Amino acid sequence: MNKNQAPHEIRRCKIFKNKKLVLEIEDVPGKLHSSASPPSSATPPSPPNQAATDRHPFLSGFAYDAVSEHELLKLLEVSPNFDTYLINLTNAGFDVIDIRGRS
């Protein structure tokens, strides 16, 4: 990094659907994790193009809602960067809350 360049401030967001937290992400390359158990009525989604253990090129995060995970993944797959993903989430009816600078 150029010593005159400011350090990258990590952007963190919480994503809600119908007032329920479904995803927390940050704009740091890393892994995507799921902490949700699928509901008994859920059918498994198609396998993603990327294995769950692979590092994602522009974000890392935790998904909390098994019902929303397939839609979240599909939106991520068509997003070339973090900002576009946030726009796609908003356009799909998710609420995006920027928590930058908060713990």
Image (cartoon, helix red, strand yellow):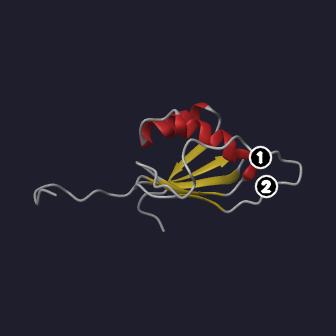
Quarter where residue 47 is shown: top right
Residue 72 relative to residue 103: left or right:
right
Q: Residue at x 50, y 58 (%)?
A: 31
C-alpha separation, residue under disc 2 versus residue under disc 1: 8 Å
The answer to whether residue 83 is left or right of residue 37 is left
Q: Are marks 2 and 1 in contact (CB under 8 Å)?
A: yes
Q: Residues within 10 Å of mark 1 (few under 14, many from 20)?
A: few
Q: Of label 2 and label 1, which has the lower sequence position?
A: 2
Nearer to me, 102 or 87: 87
Amino acid type indicated by mark 1 = Pro
Identify the residue position indicated by label 1 in the image.
44
Q: Nearer the viewer, residue 53 or 64?
A: 53
Q: Secondary structure at mark 2?
A: loop
Q: Is residue 44 above or below residue 55?
A: above
The mark lying in front, picked from 2 and 1, is 1
Choose top left, top right, bottom left or bottom right for residue 38: bottom right
Q: Percent position (x, y) of residue 85?
A: 50, 39
Residue, far right: 41
User: What numbered label is drawn on residue 38?
Assistant: 2
Of 22 and 102, the residue lying toward us: 22
Which quadrant would the N terminus be assigned to in this image? bottom left
Q: x, y percentage for residue 98? A: 49, 51
The x and y percentages for residue 30 are: 45, 58
Residue type, mark 2 in image:
Pro
